[in-house]
Image: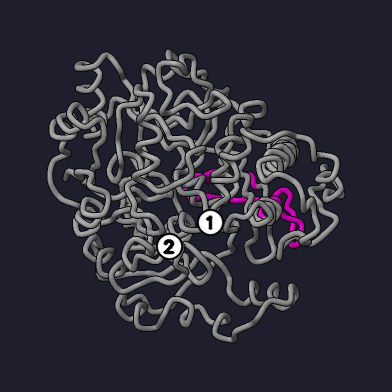
Amino acid sequence: MNYVGISSGFHDAALSVIDDDGNILFAGHSERYNKEKHTKDLCYDIVEDALSYTTSSDIEIHYYERPWIKFLRQVRSGEKLSLSNLFVKEIIGQDLIDKLQGGKVHTHNHHLSHAAAGFQTSPYDDATVVVIDAIGEFDTISIYNAWYDKNGVAKYKKLWGQTYPDSIGLFYSAMTQRAGLRPLDEEYILMGMAAYGKDSHLKEFNKLIRSYKDITFTDNLHTGVPDEFLKDADNMDIATATQLITEQLIMQVMSKARMLGGSKNLVYGGGVALNCLANRLLGEYYDNIWIMPNPGDAGSSIGAACLGYGKRVNWTNAFLGHDISGDYPANRVIDCLLTDKIAGVASGRAEFGPRALGHRSLLADPRGQEIKDKVNEIKRRQKFRPFAPIILEEYADTYFDMPNGFDNSRYMQVIARCRLPDLFPAIVHYDGTSRVQTVPNDGSGIRELLEKWYVLTGCPILLNTSLNIRGEPMVNDRKDADRFELMYNVKVIS
């Protein structure tokens, strides 16, 4: 039996496959196949690619939420309705279901899919699971106890939750829109902007909060804030206040979870878990923290498949998508870095998640004063935005002050203060922090690259950002890489 998990119909469609031994055979983003960023629909090409990894013709399909319950919430919220959204086979597409030969489609609660994606990929036998996102069917925050029974079956008990319209995720998206950015897309830019602003508008922001303890808001922020809300405020100041308020709200949830759950292990999921700036605070409540590299809705495709499979899955790394075959080109990448200081790499299986981790990356020497502006120019993005360092894991504490609860950061899930910012101006943000990616001694190609780079330069760090053409998803296949080379005149090595 192969268990296919699907998230689609709203944004960031994805598909995952787990086999009967708990191996994740495939997990990929539909947007990287149809080139439509944040696409809500599965496409034929991702299904075709996924099927090439299946090991059985016996397939069971699991969908990440319950459409009819979501439809009821959409009725309540006054959204424009479509009866086709009631039927999961219409949302996925009958032609794709037929291609998968899956027959009946099993549906699961949206937040439970988030929880399963986190817990069943985690190394823990038990955990407190926290899910915070914009909105599922009705849920916006959920706290669970999770454990495995004597047969190894994952069990979940919900301890507390909050429901629509009170939502930390909707609050953050509303403020993303207020700052002139695209909601459900550019929240990460708002997070980066927060370092530049002042906290002079906290009083006005606090008027939006009815109760920090219960995580309730005075208004429904689903459609944003009124145009007159702080209409003359600087967008950087909006970002600062948004981040500070969000961190307070998240910590209220974590405090409640620690009290209700009892476990020292935290599994954290939902789109809000991508806020790596807020994640630095999680160690105040938990000794051990697991955030899977794709905690948003796309990652719930793994969660839905996990619920079908029922037990712990074998998590090794996030390289689960489309394969560009061949050995990792460490030596050729280093040659390019030594010559040009910048190199693209598109090799092996694509990352599952929003962050490039070395297989679809634009890499650079982090030590030069001019590198940050040069890479920003290539990427056609705002000059204020920071880049991430990728570092040999054993040197992380030498160069970064890692926050409590994070002895590593293999998926860029937390920020850390750089101990030597003057040496690495390209990867240090305005506030002195970096979104760190640590690479363990795992025999991987990116590990080999960093080891050889360190021997040659004495520097265990490279700048790492996603390899993508502006306005498009990350490079997926060699054809995409060739287009990137042509457009930006940067060598992409496979």
Local crowd size for mark 1, using a 10 Å CA cut-off: few (<14), some (14–19), many (≥20): some
The quarter of the displayed image where residue 289 is located = top right
**Amino acid marked by disc 1:** Asp
Marks 2 & 1, CB-CB < 8 Å contact: yes
Please give the range of residues in magenta: 144-169
User: Which residue occupies the foreground of this view, 85 or 153?
Assistant: 85
**Amino acid marked by disc 2:** Lys
The quarter of the displayed image where residue 219 is located = bottom right
- Which residue, given by chain and number where applicable, does mark 2 sit on? 37
Task: From the top left corner, tell me how far across and down residue 336 is, in percent.
Answer: 17, 33
Q: Is residue 160 magenta?
A: yes
Task: For the N terminus, give its image quadrant.
Answer: bottom left
Task: From the top left corner, tell me how far across and down residue 63 is, in percent.
Answer: 48, 68
Q: Circle 2 sits in a helix, a strand or a loop, which is it?
A: loop
Task: From the top left corner, tell me how far across and down residue 16 is, in percent.
Answer: 37, 59
Q: Which mark is residue 308?
A: none
